Amino acid sequence: MEKGEDKLWRVLEFYSGIGGMRYSLMKAGVNAEVVEAFDINDTANDVYEQNFGHRPHQKCGFYPPLANLTRDKTSDTHEKMISMLREISFNTQEFILSPLQFGVPYSRPRYFCLAKRKPLSFCKAQVNSYLGAPGPVLWSDENMVTSEGVELNGYWDKLLENCRPIEDFLDLKNCVSDAEESKEGKRAFNNPLNQYYVPSALIERWGSAMDIVFPESRRCCCFTKSYFRYVKGTGSLLATVPGMVKDQISSLQDLSLRYFTPREVANLHSFPEDFKFPPHVSLRQRYALLGNSLSVGVVAQLLCYLFADETL
């Protein structure tokens, strides 16, 4: 990024995907313009163009393999990246953050690195000692939590208490009462959610490996790019019967399990309501693109912190 004469930050958006970073800039209220975007994925570029009226360039350079850094914060690649940034006079701060820490019932821990070229510095110089998991407000001392602190049971319990229920993120406009339909032993023929119900054969085979949540739950697992193609380890499934009766149900088949819709996954990633997929993008492609995207709500908070005081 660089600041132009018109006081706008001029942004180059590499690996722009479906626009998560651009939406984060907008949500954060950063005085910036995206000068150009770049991505090698043709379908992702279709989605980006649909929402922003501009098609990213389709040539990109090397992508540092840091995706699994949440598991290994001392990888060689990580050390080389931080060392290189310091050699060229950048101050850095690192975070591992999840939407759960911002009130969204979605477990998706990811590594983030912010950098400012000297003499610019960060408002909270001590943040790097808290790499494990900062609290909900990154720049508030009372909310900072050390790596050791997150191991305490009370920390995650408190986060979940502050999360909104999953039902707040569901596509209620398209829902019909599954509880009422299940009483009759059938689903409405015109139910738009029919395509998302999990087939009985998959429940019988993989039921014990499924992560099942209810509308009133305050946590669901990370959705990967393989969601909807596979059920094991790719994301949570939604039980559409009321949670109050779950203890009375003897079979997983009776839970009326379904996949979260792409719109609901986008909601949990904090994409705005006006975000749309082009009609030609298939259901599997939508899940794959969302699985490779970022959490707009988390990144927006990071950008607010990054630009909190430009003069420092």
Image (cartoon, rainbow, N blue to C red):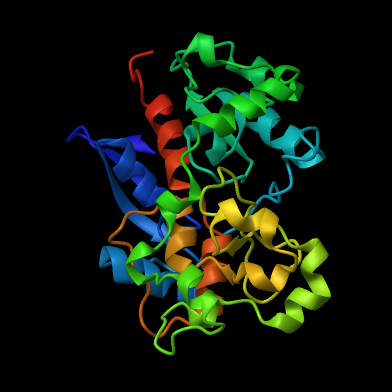
274 on left or right of 178: left
Q: What percent of the width, then of the height, locates residue 81?
A: 68, 36
Asked if one can make out residue 226 in the rendered structure from this viewpoint, the answer is no
* Residue ranking furthest to the bottom: 189
Compared to residue 229, the image places residue 83 above or below, namely above
Please state which of residues 191 and 211 is positioned toward the viewer in this rendering: 191
Compared to residue 245, the image places residue 11 above or below, namely above
Q: What percent of the width, then of the height, locates residue 311?
A: 33, 15
Q: Residue at x 71, y 57 (%)?
A: 211
Q: Quadrant of residue 80?
A: top right
Asked if one can make out residue 310 in the rendered structure from this viewpoint, the answer is yes
73 on left or right of 56: right
Q: Residue at x 75, y 32 (%)?
A: 79
Compared to residue 156, the image places residue 75 above or below, namely below
* Residue ranking furthest to the left: 6
Q: Residue at x 39, y 39 (%)?
A: 1
Q: What percent of the width, then of the height, locates residue 300?
A: 40, 38
Could you tell me which quadrant the C terminus lies in?
Answer: top left
Q: How many marks?
A: 0
124 on left or right of 110: left
